[in-house]
Amino acid sequence: MNKQDKLDSFVKLYHLINFYYENRDQPADKEFDFFEEVKTNCDTLEIDYDSFIQELRLQRL
Protein backbone atom coordinates (compact mmCIF):
# COMPACT_ATOMS: atom_id res chain seq x y z
CA MET A 1 0.00 0.00 0.00
CA ASN A 2 1.51 3.31 -0.97
CA LYS A 3 1.35 6.54 1.00
CA GLN A 4 -1.16 8.14 -1.36
CA ASP A 5 -3.61 5.25 -0.91
CA LYS A 6 -3.35 5.62 2.85
CA LEU A 7 -3.81 9.38 2.66
CA ASP A 8 -6.86 8.93 0.42
CA SER A 9 -8.35 6.44 2.88
CA PHE A 10 -7.69 8.76 5.80
CA VAL A 11 -9.47 11.62 4.03
CA LYS A 12 -12.41 9.35 3.16
CA LEU A 13 -12.62 8.14 6.76
CA TYR A 14 -12.55 11.73 8.00
CA HIS A 15 -15.44 12.64 5.70
CA LEU A 16 -17.37 9.52 6.68
CA ILE A 17 -17.10 10.43 10.36
CA ASN A 18 -18.32 13.96 9.66
CA PHE A 19 -21.14 12.52 7.57
CA TYR A 20 -22.15 10.21 10.42
CA TYR A 21 -22.38 12.96 13.02
CA GLU A 22 -24.19 15.36 10.70
CA ASN A 23 -26.65 12.85 9.22
CA ARG A 24 -27.01 9.94 11.62
CA ASP A 25 -30.69 10.63 12.31
CA GLN A 26 -31.59 11.05 8.65
CA PRO A 27 -32.70 8.34 6.22
CA ALA A 28 -29.78 6.97 4.23
CA ASP A 29 -29.55 5.96 0.60
CA LYS A 30 -30.11 2.19 0.45
CA GLU A 31 -27.14 1.86 -1.91
CA PHE A 32 -24.76 3.42 0.63
CA ASP A 33 -23.36 1.19 3.38
CA PHE A 34 -21.65 3.55 5.81
CA PHE A 35 -20.14 0.81 7.96
CA GLU A 36 -18.78 -1.09 4.97
CA GLU A 37 -17.11 2.11 3.74
CA VAL A 38 -15.58 2.63 7.19
CA LYS A 39 -14.36 -0.97 7.28
CA THR A 40 -12.75 -0.68 3.85
CA ASN A 41 -10.85 2.44 4.87
CA CYS A 42 -9.87 1.00 8.25
CA ASP A 43 -8.45 -2.03 6.45
CA THR A 44 -6.42 0.20 4.15
CA LEU A 45 -5.06 2.14 7.11
CA GLU A 46 -4.48 -1.05 9.11
CA ILE A 47 -6.79 0.14 11.89
CA ASP A 48 -8.80 -2.38 13.86
CA TYR A 49 -12.36 -1.78 12.64
CA ASP A 50 -14.13 -2.94 15.82
CA SER A 51 -11.92 -0.81 18.05
CA PHE A 52 -12.43 2.18 15.77
CA ILE A 53 -16.22 1.80 15.86
CA GLN A 54 -16.18 1.40 19.63
CA GLU A 55 -13.80 4.31 20.24
CA LEU A 56 -15.88 6.73 18.17
CA ARG A 57 -19.16 5.27 19.45
CA LEU A 58 -20.51 4.71 15.97
CA GLN A 59 -23.80 2.84 16.11
CA ARG A 60 -26.24 1.53 13.58
CA LEU A 61 -29.57 3.22 14.12
Image (cartoon, grey):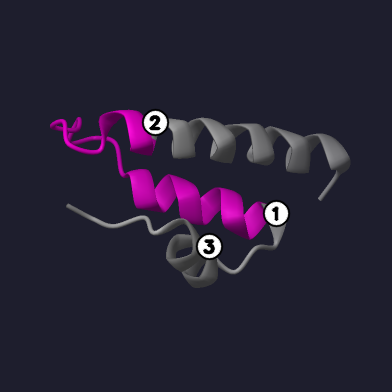
Badge 1 local density, few (<14 within 10 Å), some, or many (20+)?
some
**At 29% across and 57% down in the image, what residue appears?**
59
The reply, left or right, for residue 13 in relation to residue 35 is: right
Return the x and y of residue 31 as percentages of the image width and height.
24, 35
Q: Read off the residue under disc 2.
A: 19
Q: Read off the residue under disc 3.
A: 52
Q: In this view, does 41 lie above or below 8?
A: below
Look at the image and give the residue range highlighted in magenta.
20-44
**At 53% across and 70% down in the image, what residue appears?**
51
Amino acid type, residue under disc 2 in the picture: Phe
**At 16% across and 31% down in the image, what residue appears?**
26
Foreground: 59 or 3?
59
Q: Is residue 50 above or below residue 13?
A: below
Q: Read off the residue under disc 1.
A: 45
Nearer-N-terminus badge (1/2): 2
Badge 3 local density, few (<14 within 10 Å), some, or many (20+)?
some
